[in-house]
Image (cartoon, rainbow, N blue to C red):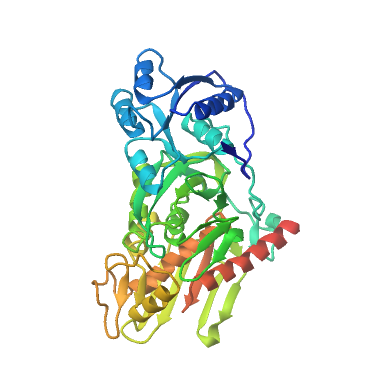
Amino acid sequence: MFLASDFLLPMFKMNHTKTIMVVDDEESIRQSLSDVLQDEGFDVILAGDGREALKMLDSNMPDLIILDIWMPVMDGTEVLKEIKKSSPDLEVIMISGHGNIEAAVKAIKLGAYDYIEKPLSLECVILTVKRALGESGVRSQKSGVRSMPPNASIGGQKSEDRQVAAHSRQRTIKKSIVMGGQGLHSGGKTGVILSPLPPHSGIIFTGLSSEEMIPAHLDYVSSTDYATTLKRGHASIMTIEHLMAVLHIYKISNLLIKIGSEVPIMDGSAADFCGMIEDGGIEEQGEPLNDIIIDDVYTVGIPANGRYISIEPFPCLSIQYCMDYPPPIGKQEASFLLDDTEVFKKEIAPARTFGSVKDYGKLEEMGLAKGGRLSNVVLVGEDKVINTSLRFSNEFARHKILDITGDLYLLGRPIKGKVTARMTGHTENILLLRKIAEGMTTVAQK
């Protein structure tokens, strides 16, 4: 069964015919995939179970295998292990009609290129196949989000009045990588699978079945209650800010993120996500990546009232945060130039999510923070931190900088500007982005 998608893929001619093996015990799935792949110009060979597939590999080595997990005779994960023993470089895409994020994480760890849940999306299958084969001609259509001219500045000046150089190239990752964990608010087991995408694709969140693709963009923010949530149609992704912060600083601009419903909280910080990106490797792509240059002052809130966030022109990304809470948090300040991944990785990424015992009672009533554990949240009691030692004396202010860094990337490109904030959270971050986006739209219309 194939479902339509909002992301239709352009067809392109293959330089030479490549062969794909489809292994599935359901004849209808085998035949449907065969028809679709042949229409795309591939040769297709079919196998009804794992043992048959392994025998065929002795005499007919394909360029790619699409392998079902749940099959009689021999389970797909066992087939995958055998394939990787004999042909470690042969890419395998796993499919399943009874899967979940745990099955996906296991498949990727065993060496699968990607994992797709049934019912299969036609566009998702073709996109994944062409990515696995290294076809650079695959490009996703624009998702309808607002954008600005590549060399436009933000503010009162027209783009031709200010030179904005491409300081870097677009980036993706070299290979699919995976991480499992627990959702802070959902409480369930979750995980992420990151896969490379070609230039101009953007950062896209999707479920395992890829029925709905959600661009990591301001236009799809649906909630800022205790975390940033994206939503499109019936699909939503929670708690994206820590991962987005890492992608922002590492300037990963094209990426497919498969997930359950929530990014795993890990230890409450972004440190593990830094390690994940570095382990997977970063690949620079041929197209330029132009930063968003802030060329005016934008403010949300009133500084005199003590709760505000603003951004103004500055040659790199700088964030200063100040908080003033009753003890034991007290007054904390932090300020960093975030133009270096090492500074971010050592000084900002390790700062953890925090909350008070009173807050957690409220969150439980709201059905949130079900995954809050002593190991992934800094828990503040009436007079002290009760479950851990702080990593920094101003760890809470540093964590707020982490959140701001992630939310800022929802404009789709790295930002250069000086952010000053006091006593703010995700709601004010997104309101600031909306003001910047209005400036982008004004510039684009001139």
User: Between residues 361 and 153, which one lies in front from this camera angle?
Assistant: 361
* Vertical order, 245 against 296 (above or below): above
Residue depicted at 62% across the width and 27% down the height:
12
Residue depicted at 35% across the width and 49% down the height:
179
Question: Which x, y percent locates residue 229?
Answer: 51, 62
Q: Which quadrant of the figure has residue 291?
A: bottom right
Horizontal side, residue 316 vs residue 87: left or right? right
Horizontal side, residue 107 vs residue 225: left or right? left
Q: Which quadrant of the figure has residue 385?
A: bottom left
* Vertical order, 2 against 15 (above or below): below
* Vertical order, 55 against 371 (above or below): above
Query: Where's the N terminus, which quadrant?
Result: top right
Q: Farthest residue toward the top? A: 59
So how many labels did they put on this image? 0
Query: Where's the C terminus, which quadrant?
Result: bottom right
Residue 167 appears in view: no
* Vertical order, 16 against 268 (above or below): above
Question: Which x, y percent locates residue 32?
Answer: 56, 28
Residue 364 appears in view: yes
Question: Which x, y percent locates residue 111?
Answer: 34, 35
User: Between residues 133 and 155, which one lies in front from this camera angle?
Assistant: 133
Horizontal side, residue 333 vs residue 416: left or right? left
Question: Which x, y percent locates residue 169?
Answer: 52, 44
Residue depicted at 70% across the width and 60% down the height:
441
User: Between residues 133 and 235, which one lies in front from this camera angle?
Assistant: 235
